[in-house]
Image (cartoon, rainbow, N blue to C red):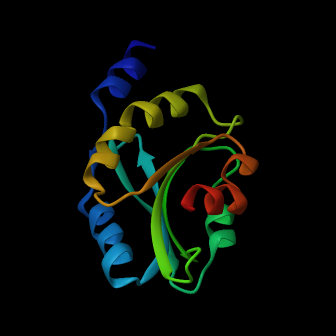
């Protein structure tokens, strides 16, 4: 237990590919979302999946495992009330109830390290089940 606490409080290194994939999504619009995972053995945050530009929110929801934690960033495009095309980036912390306690602690304590590197995030969502991060929740937060 002491080892788990030590790893959790020290945080994780963030691989360069995490920042690169986020910047490509943000500026070049080559992807719609990026899912990150923590490799406990290597003690670093790495890219798990990158959603193509044509993929939507359903692709992101399908990319999140039902029994393990993940971080995700999602580029949400929408029309504002004055019919202008807008884009907001969401940072999602996925921590399902079926995941291990150790994993939940690790992701909770390492979140700020990754979040600090990803500049330009507009909203943050924490979810333990799909209903807490549904498309209607994302759309409502963006307005």
Q: Position of residue 47 (x, y in %)?
A: 41, 62
Quadrant position of residue 129: top right
Q: Position of residue 48 (x, y in %)?
A: 47, 62
Q: How many marks?
A: 0
Residue at point 35% right, 73% down?
26
Give 1 or 53, whichever is nearer the viewer: 53
Give 91 or 84, whichever is nearer the viewer: 84
Residue at point 33% right, 20% down?
6
Q: Position of residue 90 (x, y in %)?
A: 48, 58
Q: Residue furthest top?
A: 2
Residue at point 24% right, 61% down?
16
Residue at point 34% right, 27% down?
7
Q: Residue furthest front?
A: 82
- Position of 86 with respect to 112 (left or right) is right
Quadrant position of residue 63: bottom right
Q: Position of residue 80 (x, y in %)?
A: 55, 74
């Amino acid at each position: 237990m002491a080892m788990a606490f030590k790893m959790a409080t020290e945080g994780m290194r963030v691989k360069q590919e995490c920042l690169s994939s986020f910047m490509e999504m943000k500026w070049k619009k080559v992807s719609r979302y990026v899912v990150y995972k923590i490799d406990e053995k290597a003690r670093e945050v790495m890219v798990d999946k990158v959603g193509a530009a044509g993929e939507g929110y359903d692709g992101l929801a399908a990319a999140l495992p039902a029994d393990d934690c993940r971080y995700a960033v999602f580029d949400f495009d929408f029309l504002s009330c004055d019919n202008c095309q807008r884009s907001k980036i969401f940072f999602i912390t996925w921590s399902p109830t079926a995941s291990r306690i150790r994993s939940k602690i690790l992701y909770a304590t390492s979140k700020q390290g990754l979040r600090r590197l990803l500049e330009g995030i507009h909203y943050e969502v924490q979810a333990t089940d799909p209903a807490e991060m549904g498309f209607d929740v994302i759309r409502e937060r963006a307005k």
